[in-house]
Image (spheres, rainbow, N blue to C red):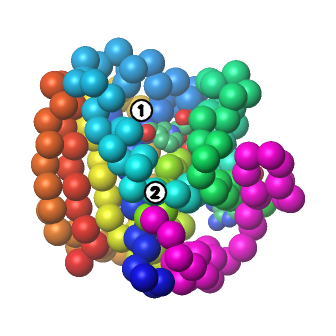
Amino acid sequence: MSGQRKIVLYIATSLDGYIATKDDSLEWLFKVEGDGDNGYSEFLETVDTILIGRRTYDWVMDYEKGNFPYKNKKCYVFSKTLSGKNENVEFVNEDIAGFAKKIKETEGKNIWIVGGGELLHFFIKERLVDEFIITIAPTLIGSGIPLFKENNFELELELKNIRRFNQFVELHYVLK
Ligand SMILES: NC(=O)c1ccc[n+]([C@@H]2O[C@H](COP(=O)([O-])OP(=O)(O)OC[C@H]3O[C@@H](n4cnc5c(N)ncnc54)[C@H](OP(=O)(O)O)[C@@H]3O)[C@@H](O)[C@H]2O)c1
């Protein structure tokens, strides 16, 4: 049914609220003992479209050594410096609310907003994220790139589910 797709944040964070160190390392995350793939492939099945910030896209391409991992999904990379498309992604520099409205009106599965924190900030500000699935690592990293930037608005969520994957806890919220 059209108009029913949701924009879902699925992301991992340190216990003190960072998604990466200042120099973009996720080593603190990768060394945590989880359970299987911690629900990742199950989540991936629920989405067919991916929204990603340019810095996160660069990180992924670097980490995967150029092998783009979401080849079977429609991928939009938000950037004010890059445009056009390549074999894997389309670069977008549009009004975020207008873009989100347009994409939600097309048919398909849910839409994964990958992050990072900067792109997410704009989506949250416009109340465009319908669901938040946040996996917490049992680590304080002290400083880094915050999951949620400082802001001047309040967003009320409703807790939908909690799951444990060994040392990780997954919190699932929906926008009120
Ligand atoms: N822990 C996790 O699960 C997780 C998940 C995702 C990311 N990360 C990490 O987060 C880090 C990157 O996060 P970040 O917050 O620094 O950057 P980001 O949000 O990934 O990317 C920021 C860039 O996105 C573009 N952008 C942002 N808002 C835009 C808008 N409204 N319109 C058009 N373009 C826009 C700009 O690109 P231009 O500069 O090209 O204009 C901006 O420099 C990486 O280290 C990554 O590994 C971790």
Question: Alpha-carbon distance for marks 1 and 2?
Answer: 31 Å
| Amino acid type, callout 1 | Ser
Secondary structure under the numbered disc 2 in the rendered image: strand
From the viewer's perspective, is 6 left or right of 154? right
Q: Label 1: which residue?
A: 143
**Rendering coords of residue 125 (x, y %):** 46, 73
Local crowd size for mark 1, using a 10 Å CA cut-off: few (<14), some (14–19), many (≥20): some
Instruction: Say which residue appears at 17% left-offset and 68% top-offset.
Output: 158
Secondary structure under the numbered disc 1 in the rendered image: loop
Asked whether the viewer can see residue 12, the reply is no
**Rendering coords of residue 34 (x, y %):** 25, 23
Asked whether the viewer can see residue 29, the reply is yes
Q: Nearer the viewer, mark 1 or mark 2?
A: 2
Q: Label 2: which residue?
A: 47
Instruction: Say which residue appears at 38% left-offset and 39% top-offset.
Output: 41
| Amino acid type, callout 2 | Val
Which residue range is magenta in the image? 82-109
**Rendering coords of residue 72 (x, y %):** 61, 47
Residue contact at pointers 1 and 2, CB within 8 angstroms: no
Q: Note whether 130 is above or below 91 in the view shown.
A: below
Instruction: Say which residue appears at 67% left-offset and 35% top-offset.
Output: 68
Q: Please state, as top left, top right, bottom left or bottom right, where the N terminus lies in the image.
A: bottom left
**Rendering coords of residue 166 (x, y %):** 16, 25
**Residue 7 occupies which quadrant of the picture?**
bottom left
Q: Note whether 112 is above or below 124 in the view shown.
A: above
Q: Is residue 85 magenta?
A: yes
Q: Is residue 145 magenta?
A: no
Instruction: Say which residue appears at 83% left-offset and 55% top-offset.
Output: 85
